[in-house]
Amino acid sequence: MPQAFDEATERFAGKTALFFHGRAIGYRELRESVDRLAGAFARLGLKKGDRLALYLLNSPQFVIAYFAALKCGCVVTPISPVYTSHEVRFQLENSGARAVVCQDILLENIRRSGAKLDHVVVTSISEYLPSLKRFFDKMFNGSGRLDPGQVGNVHRFQALLAQGDGPPEVSIDPATDLAALPYTGGTTGNPKGVMLTHRNLISATVISRSIFPFEEDGKEVIMAFLPFFHIFGQVVLMLNGLLRGHSIVLFTTPDTEGILDAVEKYRVSLFYGVPTFYEYLKDHKDTDKVDWKRLKLILSGADTLHESTVKGWTNRTGSAICEGYGLSETCATSHLNPYKRMKTGSFGVPATNVLAAVIDTETRAVVPPGEIGELILAGPNVMQGYWNNPAETARAFIEIEGVRWFRTGDLVRMDEEGYFHFHDRCKDLIKFKGHSVFAKDIEDVLYAHPAVKAAGVIGVPDPAVGQRIKAIVVPQPEARGKLTEEDIAAHCRERLADYKVPHVIEFRGELPKTDVGKVSRRELRDEQTA
């Protein structure tokens, strides 16, 4: 990865790498900052194999610290900025991180976590704002926010940059040396560290080149409001964007009005989002500010894209959303819809170098097209295993005819044309009187109701029938207090077999979400047993 970064920054030295709230940072400046920080990390004693955590919002500091850590041979473990101190402590301790680069506004969570660290590097968003914005940021937020308190050996980010010289000489074996240790979302139990080598990440960027042939090196502009701590933002946007010489428009938070303005201001050509954002955007008052048909790519990932969202988006914008699929364990990408042959309702076909198959969840035999089973994957982008968790690693892999396959835990089917269709997570399958009911099938029907804004479906244990089906529904604002349980039940009865119609319907103002915007069925299930 450091070699690929150096090659890109030399090739595109005269181009802008990052736009950050009006500040432009060129590839040459980015390279110099990375090299200086890598030297400073080495002087702190950080060395090959050490884990370094990034507890940061999207910012130039995230990019600089990420590549600086890799140049020292360290393993980067990004932490979600929305994590509580308890969750932060788990990841820091489980990964064995020696140091963390932390946003000043998140420092209190590091203190509260009680995690023992050799070094804490503190930074502020204002450090990379244009001078006028930096002045107002200090005026309204105070200039003393960087006072770190007693949490170990504390350093300021800019001070380290000033002290650093050049990066250390480090020998890296791409096949075996780890580069990144992202943590899964923890949908069942504690999150697991995903071991990704330099080869894994490089292979992911090679895959991106092959599945996005219309991208021109050094000529694209990427909108980046998806969080870099998440594998989608980290690999598809940050790594692929920078290693191809693109310009990245960075947003620390998904400010809709600001994003729409920036798409036109910076002539963004590649736009990435999650389904909930497109669902929101298709009805937003300012969506028409953007000529969406001008963009080369509008892509959705990280969750299932509902057909109602696709239709609403296309009707509003005249453009198409390209759906893909991937996991932390596959460096973000395994499938994508062919750019000129997209199929609504499918997450596409396997990407270059990726093998995909569908197996029976019980017999583990490969099933033919049209049958539903568990998706398994193999390829150079597939993780080495779970950090310090041999039992989970063993459960995650299966060998078939000499090939080591990763078991995704997702139920899918492949159609006759080789397109894959998502049905549900294995653990989200609901068993009612012996029938297999997919939560997603019911949610798709609920989303098709014009008065429904969001929905989540779970199974509630009932000894008499196995599980009863419960639907938690968020009405559209104008339908609140008017939409009834019978309205929803009648809508479902028209479109679903009797055994799939929800037995319990609950209305709420909002649904729990994961840190990347997915409806958290795990939290909905946990509520039933609390």
Image: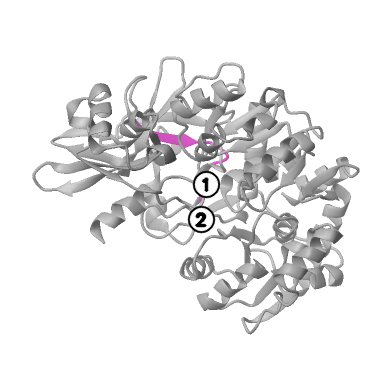
Give how far across and how far down residue 466 sits, in percent: 15, 43
The label number, if any, that marks residue 183 in the structure image: 2
Compared to residue 67, the image places residue 154 above or below, namely below
Where's residue 431, x and y in %?
20, 39
What x and y, as percent, mark residue 524? 32, 51
Residue 320 sits inside the magenta stretch: no
Residue 482 lies in quadrant: top left
Dot 1 falls on a residue whose secondary structure is helix
Who is closer to the viewer here, 198 or 78? 78
Disc 2 residue type (three-letter): Tyr
The residue where tag 1 is placed is: 328
Q: CA distance from mark 1 to mark 2?
A: 8 Å
50 left or right of 163 in image = left
Task: Find out whether residue 379 is within the magenta segment.
Answer: yes
Pointer 1: residues within 10 angstroms few (<14), some, or many (20+)? Answer: many
Q: Find out whether the residues at labels 1 and 2 contact each other: C-beta distance under 8 Å.
A: yes
Question: Residue at left 34%, top 32%?
Answer: 446
Magenta residues, start to end: 373-384
Relative depth, front residue between 247 and 308: 308
